Amino acid sequence: MKNIISRISLALCASIAVSSCNLDETPYGFYSEDNFYRTAEDAESAVNYAYGCLTFLEYSRAVFFLGDMPSEVITTKSDASIDNQDLDRWRVATFSTNTTLENFFKYGFIGVNRANAVIKNIPGCTFDQERKDQFLGEAYFLRAWNYFNLVRNFGLVPMHRSVVQTLDQTSTPLANDMDEVYDMILGDCRKAIELMPVYSAPRLGRADRVAAQALAAKAYLYVASAKEHNVMLYRDMRRQTKEMYDSAAYYAGQVINGQNVYGFDNNLLDIYDVTKANGPEHIFMMSMDRTGNSEGEYSKISKMFLPYVDGATIYLRQGDSNEFIPSHDGWGEYRTTEVFYKSFDNNDKRKTHLIVDKVYNAQGEVIAQYPGKFAYPFCRKYIDPQFQGDKTSTRPFLIRYSDVALIYAEAAGPTPESYRLVNFIRNRAGLGDLTQGLSTDAFREAIYKERSFELSFEGDRMYDIRRFNRVSEISEAKGMSEENVTFYPIPQAEINLNGSLRK
């Protein structure tokens, strides 16, 4: 909070200095943490400031660098930064000084601190209680969101339950165990669920009660699955596996049956249409828009997925239609691996409609294809036909309704409702129903596979691999120790700053 207050103060003082002819004029306003939260508008600015951490360039790109690149889904180009090549190739000796990991860790805790500032100050505000509850609920959601991302990547992390205001508060030690971390995550989710409403329509970049229910479902499933599969630290948790599966199914069921705002989109391409960002699938996503002034306000995510073709506008076919939409070409940073591309059923629309192997000109004539002029078939989930140079409105999909439906199915096991949800997803993709009569283990294995296709290129795959304890099956990670494949190490830069993290 101090950073935003300082910026407001400096900007205000500068404007006074520029506009004043009388040097004796008394300044008429100064914001501090003591008087900033006087109005609902002040409080909402603080909440937006907490959301803003998600769109930091280094943090938003890490959705893919950490969630997909170390898996079989994508790889990177030969001249990518050495840090990202190291993540892709599992060069664990470099991880403690990897700047991508350093930035993700740092900005995760900046997000925690900004959320803590809202949690500290909102209760004392005097505007109406309904808005206070909404803002406070969003802050609890964001703290849980950031901690969930931190614990999945780094394991035990420092537990900051209040705003860091003094130097000694930066020396917070690691959590005692995974139960302590998830006590906070799940407790914050429950508080957010209690405090927040369900909006009458999705609100781009903002969370509501459904987002908090979905996050709780994701967290409960992660614990249940990781403990069942004997993942390091999770296997020692006091929580019981069946209870965690039941809780995951309960909260996912609240999303599926407890509201009428979010739901399945019938058309795959509509899910990824930037003009339909408030569609029913989008429970929580980032708020980037091409009208922004700097990256983070706008997005270049599309440039990361698309290959370089010839530097000009290219056109992509819309499914099986004769409609073609324009796009720029890109930098080829996130490259679909051949093994993942070939793992799809050839009739799967998530392959034929959402992964591109041909590009066209405005007349619908093929100008390049894979294999050939571009080196890999590319994901087209992040396309903005109204791009302005490098500026787009493409956004990471942080929580989708289909993700929650698959969470319910995996947690509940092979029930009729689970089959209904999975079969909708498969049928939408042009595939037949899932085999009936599967055992619980076989059914969950089928969901694990289905998630790899449905949520591909959305930053989920690596976390599914982690909770199923299958990192060692990745070719680059074979033969590594359990400690090396389970979590990334705390960045050395953070250990240097916080002596209590030294072992």
Image: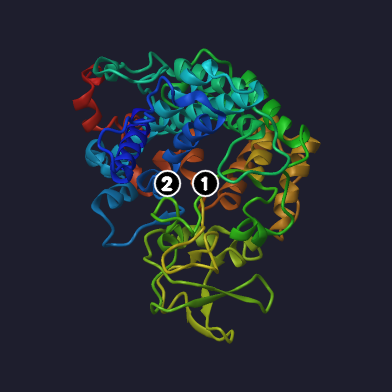
Of labels 2 and 1, earlier in sequence is 2
- The foreground one among 138 and 498 is 138
The correct choice, above or below, for 476 with respect to 369 in the image is above
Residue 352 relative to residue 334: left or right: right
Examine the rendering and report whether any part of residue 498 can be seen. Answer: yes
| 385 with respect to 63 (left or right) | right
Q: Is the C terminus in the top left, top right, bottom left or bottom right quadrant?
A: top left
Residue drawn at (54%, 16%), measured in percent from left and top?
123
Three-letter code, disc 1? Met
Q: Are marks 2 and 1 in contact (CB under 8 Å)?
A: yes
Query: What residue sits 74% from the left and 41% below the top?
Result: 261
> Where's residue 479, x and y in %?
32, 39
Looking at the picture, how far across and down is residue 197, in whole percent? 69, 30
The quadrant of the rendering that contains the N terminus is top left
| Residue 225 in view | no
Horizontal arrangement in the rendering, residue 480 relative to residue 131 (left or right): left
Q: Which residue is mark 1?
A: 286
